[in-house]
Image (tube, coloured by chain):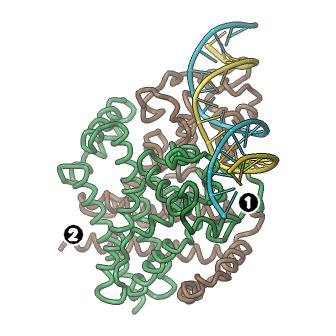
Chain colours: A brown, B green, C cyan, D yellow
DNA sequence: ACCTGAACACCGTTCAAGT
DNA sequence: ACCTGAACACCGTTCAAGT
């Protein structure tokens, strides 16, 4: 949804990481308000986690930092730049597996799990990934790790990018929806199972959806698991197995 | 990123499709300004396509319709409701394959292609899919089609949801990034190859990325294709082949 | 039944001024 | 070098009023 920074008419730099005027500011400390870039980024992540992207504003951030709204602009050029910085910061919290030892399957599962956890822990991350270039140091390290793992699979070079896409775009989509669902539950003050039951009930009441849902019911039944979380683990696990089996099949095919 | 409708404190209905006070309004015509819900939705889609979600506002929409900002609120309760309606409307433009005849592989490829095209044609769609419940009639028809196709694969019931996830979350992620890239190109007034070369050049200049890119270069080389579009087709095609191979492998495994 | 105008409570950002 | 206050050009939405 991009953020609301269209009022700037400047030549359109595409990323914080490609420098702006505030680029090298705020690395020191002992300033009047004790502000620096890291503190600002920390507070940004905290606010985004607590209230969601829609409720985040530069003014609220400033209030959180006990500072006037405009002080922040000494350290970052725009709200978009700040969000890009926050995005890269949380990418730094994903543990990267050792890609020089062990089986690629385990490496892939580990990185997929870490990526999914990131998207669930910080639901505001997913739209930002789609919005920015993701060339910050931590995002890059993550991409590098993914590349190395896919290289370890034995996929032919021309298929490695497609392999990365298949796996990590899947995790992205899955984690996006999962994080969003959890967010909605929290807003409604219900746990995931309560919310699920309620949503299902409401939808089912509408006559136009009766028929549609008859089909889905079987499917729900078959998925098994007593809780929403169990169902999700099962689906995620099966999909990852499917992807790994797909990679193995393509590796075989390339040898033939 | 959700839209900015947090100022409403009402009990939080979660979707237009679960009714609001404006639910059954604007189905007629011959009104003073000739307005109705469909015209409003059409104009919304047009504006979103032309200017992007960030530049869309209720006030601009009203101007486009030659009407005062507030007239629109006779037909829709909130901006979020309107976006949800627009989302479902464009879902109606995806051609659904005949799921009762032919090979599931062709059906899957066709629906994946249609979904991808939707995300590329309307880059504003992807964040909205992550934001709303997607229970409008056209979204539901799409999901139903996906379900039927996955059923045709012969996957065991407990794996069908995971199979849908793997395929369509992949397409979602792929189409999101693709649409976003094309949008950026248009904004910069460059074609995709020009923009790609320029972005690569800029990033490569930064010393901290030199090493990182050495690795990627080989990969780029191997992907082949002379244009960005050719590379993308290759990656998308390979990933879909991988997913189909994965489904086939899981079907085999379930028979053992 | 439909549309308008004025107002409210917000935004991101600029700019000149303070210390 | 860092921070502030006031102002500008926007938002989504409410509400009372018009026709």
Along the line of sight, which residue is nearer the eye, A69 or A227? A69
Residue at mark 1 to residue at mark 2: CA–CA distance: 49 Å
Along the line of sight, which residue is nearer the eye, A188 or A101? A188
- In contact (CB < 8 Å): disc 1 and disc 2: no
Q: Position of residue A3 (x, y in %)?
A: 55, 42
Would you call the spot at circle 1 few (<14 residues within 10 Å), some (14-19), or many (20 or more)? few
Residue positioned 65% across, 33% down in the render: A40
Q: Position of residue A148 (x, y in %)?
A: 36, 54
Residue positioned 29% across, 34% down in the render: B201
Q: Position of residue A101 (x, y in %)?
A: 41, 58
Sequence-wise first label, 1 or 2? 1
The image quarter containing residue A86 is top right
SS of the residue at dot 2?
helix
Q: Which residue is mark 1?
A: A187
Would you call the spot at circle 2 few (<14 residues within 10 Å), some (14-19), or many (20 or more)? few
The chain letter for the residue carrying disc 1 is A
Q: Quadrant of the C terminus of chain A?
A: bottom left
Q: Position of residue A110 (x, y in %)?
A: 50, 61
Tell me if residue B6 comes above or below residue A102 in the rendering.
above
The chain letter for the residue carrying disc 2 is A
- Of the numbered discs in the image, which one, if any, rests on residue A254? 2
Q: Is residue A103 visible?
A: no
Tell me if residue D18 comes above or below residue B197 in the rendering.
below
């Amino acid at each position: 949804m991009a953020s609301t920074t269209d009022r700037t008419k400047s030549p359109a730099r595409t990323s914080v990481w490609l420098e702006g005027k505030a680029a090298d500011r705020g690395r020191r400390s002992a300033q009047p308000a004790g502000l620096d870039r890291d503190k600002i980024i920390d507070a940004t992540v905290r606010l985004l986690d607590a209230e969601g992207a829609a409720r985040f504003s530069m003014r609220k951030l400033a209030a959180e930092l006990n500072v006037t709204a405009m002080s922040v602009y000494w350290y970052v050029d725009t709200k978009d730049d700040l969000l890009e910085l926050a995005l890269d910061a949380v990418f730094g919290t994903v543990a990267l597996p050792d890609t020089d030892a062990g089986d690629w399957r385990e490496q892939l599962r580990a990185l997929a799990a870490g990526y999914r956890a990131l998207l669930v822990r910080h639901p505001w991350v997913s739209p930002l990934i789609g919005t920015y270039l993701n060339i910050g140091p931590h995002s890059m390290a993550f991409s590098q790790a993914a590349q190395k793992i896919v290289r370890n699979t034995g996929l032919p070079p021309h298929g490695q990018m497609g392999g990365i896409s298949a796996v990590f775009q899947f995790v992205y989509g899955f984690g996006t929806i999962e994080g969003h669902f959890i967010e909605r539950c929290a807003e409604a003050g219900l746990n995931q199972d309560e919310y699920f039951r309620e949503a299902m009930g409401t939808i089912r009441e509408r006559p136009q959806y009766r028929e549609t849902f008859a089909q889905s019911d079987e499917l729900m039944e078959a998925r098994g698991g007593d809780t929403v979380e169990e169902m999700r683990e099962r689906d995620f696990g099966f999909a990852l197995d499917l992807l790994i089996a797909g990679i193995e099949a393509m590796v075989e095919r390339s040898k033939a």
